[in-house]
Image (cartoon, rainbow, N blue to C red):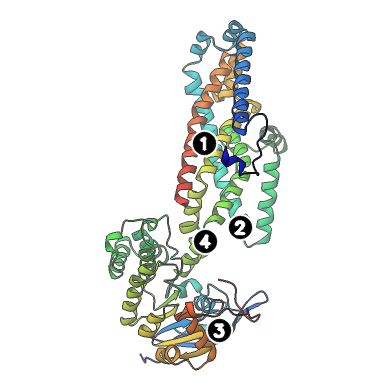
Amino acid sequence: MTPSRPEIRVSGLHKSFGDNQVLRGIDLEIGQGEVVCVIGPSGSGKSTLLRCVNLLEEPTEGQVFVGGTELTDPDVDIDAVRRRIGMVFQQFNLFPHLTVTENLTLPQRRVLRRGKAEAAKTAAENLGRVGLAEKADAYPSSLSGGQQQRVAIARALAMGPEVMLFDEPTSALDPELVGDVLAVMRMLANEGMTMMVVTHEMTFAREVADRVVFMDGGVIVEDGAPEQVIGHPRHERTRHFLSRLLDPAMADVEEETSDQVGKPE
Amino acid sequence: MADTEKLPLQPKKKGLTRRQKRSLSRGAQYAVFVAAVIAFAVTADWGRLQNQFAQADIAERMFPDVITLALKNTVLYTVTGFAVGLALGMVIALMRLSSVGPYRWLAGIYIEIFRGLPALLIFIFIGVAVPLAFPGTEIIGGTYGKVALALGLVAAAYMAETIRAGIQAVPKGQMEAARSLGFSPARAMVSIIIPQAFRIILPPLTNELVLLFKDSSLVLFLGVTLEERELSKYGRDLASQTANSTPILVAGLCYLLITVPLGFVVRRMEAKAQEAVK
């Protein structure tokens, strides 16, 4: 397999919610084993872009390919493709009526039709990978946010995905719990998982990502190596965003601009 | 008093303070209550009341039939009616949430009709109108089938709305998580959404059970055999046989035997759900 084969390919992607144009023509390729962080101000369309990649949002226009399959083909078996795409949400979205282990085994059994023993074995392996083997019988509500998010990652991994999508995975966490989740994601990156991560964690983006994509106003403004996009941004909008993100206490009071797009987050 | 002089906002009023007024009002409420109890105790004809409602030998004669026959039938009617209502209500709730317009309309019409009609009318319809309109047909299970159907038709309308609300109360992220794991919409609904919806709607569903328990008394109007009598019919029959109201009282107590603990369970569940939200 050539490393350059794009695992995710997005071309000419537009997405509107009513009159609100959230994505205005996105072209993006993510190679196999590549880790791409998508950054940008809230309302820039980065989460919508991620959700279009597994078709949780239906694109208005354009094409999305994952592993060579076109998801935007109206006749595609979307459930089959989604089994190959792991998704991690900001709000974890664990199933609260099931134990941690059942959260991992139920999708395997119902969707992949795995046997009981195999599902349990895969669940235990993946809980071990995220360091939560001892929480196997706990209910999600008894776990901290960081633990819940790691279980959510393990649940996605148990399905054996080729690609993992992360939608602001640490944004709902208390600051001291962020590290555990990032450590798991770093481990996945090192193992060669293809990852697309919408995040505000600049340190993670700088150290783990192969590429950083900066989005604003529904378009990709800058796309390059982390040291370039974060370290030496070429565009004023990128510089402006980064300065506000890295040093929020120094920001000036600004006029609200009317051309801000995207739904409020 | 030096302090009050500095507070012109609270001018010294003549008469009672607020606190005094409050205690006076509370005293008056107690006085009215005591007076009402005394008035009832004095005017009531206790001998007559006891004769009418608390004849020990008549009450004794009702046992064990009032339990083994009447209460048993009441429970049987209620439970079968509830089962029919739950199954039908689930179908209607899913129709109401369907993306197919005609299903939504049909479900809406059903709910409006059966919520708007008195349960008694449905019983008469099932018991009298249907056999006349379709002479050849026989509702399975005889009286038991008819009651289950009549109660179920009424209950389904209420339960459909409850179930729909429960399904909609499950956070959107649950469906998204299930879909992104590769669940089909139907399988996600069955495996992930509905189990959570039921946890949410357990208290209102139990309330519905209590309501059905009482509505099962409408069997009275279907014309039942001796063996099919439930609490109300049984109590009324015995009351007219003995020309005494004691059987009515006993039947009433039997209802409470079930409804009061059920109500308690509902309140417990609601309190627990409240706690879980926090």
Label 4 marks which chain's residue? B
On the question of residue A69 being in view, the answer is no
Q: Gap between marks 1 and 2, in whole Å?
A: 27 Å
Amino acid type of disc 1?
Val
Q: Gap between marks 1 and 3, in whole Å?
A: 59 Å
Amino acid type of disc 2?
Leu
Per the image, label 1 sits on a secondary structure element best described as helix
On the question of residue A20 being in view, the answer is yes
Q: Which mark is residue B186?
A: 4
Amino acid type of disc 4?
Ala
Q: Residue furthest front?
A: B2
Task: Measuring from the top left, give residue B136's x and y in whole percent.
Answer: 67, 37
Q: Gap between marks 4 and 3, in whole Å?
A: 37 Å
Using the rendered image, report if marks 1 and 2 lie on a common chain: yes
Q: Which mark is residue B97?
A: 2
Q: In percent of the image, x 51 and y 32: which residue is there? A: B76
Q: Nearer the viewer, mark 2 or mark 4?
A: 2
Task: Measuring from the top left, give residue B95's x and y in whole percent.
Answer: 61, 55
Per the image, label 3 sits on a secondary structure element best described as strand
Amino acid type of disc 3?
Asp
Q: In percent of the image, x 66 and y 39: which residue is there? A: B11
Is residue A29 depicted above or below A261 in this figure? below
Label 3 marks which chain's residue? A
Q: Callout 3: 10 Å neighbours few (<14), some, many (20+)?
A: many
Q: In percent of the image, x 52 and y 64: which residue is there? A: B185
Using the rendered image, report if marks 1 and 3 lie on a common chain: no
Label 2 marks which chain's residue? B
Q: Are marks 1 and 2 in contact (CB under 8 Å)?
A: no
Q: Which residue is mark 1?
A: B79
